[in-house]
Image: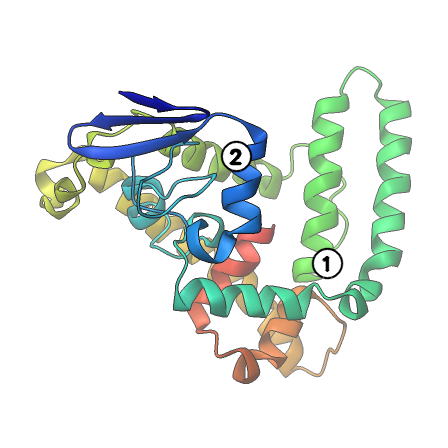
Amino acid sequence: MRCIGDLVYINVAGQGILILNSVKVAADLLDRRARIYSSRPRTIGKYTLSMISLSAYCFLTVAGEILTGDLLMPMLPYGDRWRRMRRAAHEGLSPSASKNFFASQEKEACLMLDGMLQKNSDWKNEIARSALSMSGGWIYDMPTIQNCHDPLITYGIDFMGRIVRAAFPGAHFADFFPWMKYLPSWMAKWKREAEYHFEKDDAYHQEMFQAVEKRLDAGDERVSFTSILQQDAKHTGITYSEKVWLAAAIL
């Protein structure tokens, strides 16, 4: 281990890791010099940084490549796919596009406050209901979620929980030894489970996305983030899978 001011360098199983140990240094490198250093390298843990490519949130072999199919934007390294998805997200969340969602956001805020007053012992579930109902409304043009135990809430919590557990430092040896991702699935339970959940999640997100496509084909022109993605797809160059997972990431 070597320390140079607020920089700490350690070597873990041959993987060099540079830790930025102050807000000032992190801002200098990851914000002011973002074009050089800000990316999501394939390294071993949350809030660790490689000597070559620095990031405040590292890209993990299992969580990023296998569990989410190299499609979840917050975990992508800087590159062509990240740029396409960022461009599409910018189009769908621009100030002019966001104005279309103000009314639904106000409605959901009022419903959340009312729910918190009516169920003052269940704020956690009410806030979760409101957050997913609001995001589901402006991303997929879904109706308001009325029940705190709605299947979408259960799925959303389960989906995020799997990613957080997989991304936790030390959760998988494959994050230390990336060559392990090439092991056949039959001899690696962690890989089988990650591949299974990716197929399941991919099918779920495609179903949500396709519901909006069907409404658009039927002449329903109500604005949602997904409908904007569809309309701007040629302009942004984003692929179908990238559109599906971009909407899922924002949800």
Instruction: In the rendered view, tell whether residue 53 sits above or below residue 21.
Output: below
Disc 2 residue type (three-letter) = Val
Q: Dividing the picture into quarters, in which one does residue 118 lie?
A: top right
Residue at the farthest front position: 4
Left or right, 166 with respect to 211, comes to: left
* 30, 171: nearer the viewer: 30
Q: Is residue 176 visible?
A: no
Q: Please name the residue shown 47% across and 32% down the image.
A: 161
The secondary structure type at the circle numbered 2 is helix
Q: Please name the residue shown 67% across and 52% down the image.
A: 136
Disc 1 residue type (three-letter) = Trp
* 182, 223: nearer the viewer: 182
Dot 1 alpha-carbon crowd within 10 angstroms: few under 14, some 14 to 19, many 20 or more: many
* Disc with the residue nearer the chain's start (1 vs 2): 2
- What x and y, as percent, mark residue 207? 50, 61
Q: Is residue 98 visible?
A: yes
Q: Are marks 1 and 2 in contact (CB under 8 Å)?
A: no
Q: Please name the residue shown 61% across and 38% down the image.
A: 153
Dot 2 corresponds to which residue? 25
Left or right, 73 with respect to 103, comes to: left
Dot 2 alpha-carbon crowd within 10 angstroms: few under 14, some 14 to 19, many 20 or more: some
Point out which mark residue 138 bears: 1
The nearer-to-camera label among 1 and 2 is 2
Point out which mark residue 219 bears: none
The secondary structure type at the circle numbered 1 is helix
* 239, 59: nearer the viewer: 59
- What x and y, as percent, mark residue 54? 40, 44
Instruction: In the rendered view, tell whether residue 73 sits above or below residue 80.
Output: above
Q: Dividing the picture into quarters, in which one does residue 91 lie?
A: bottom right
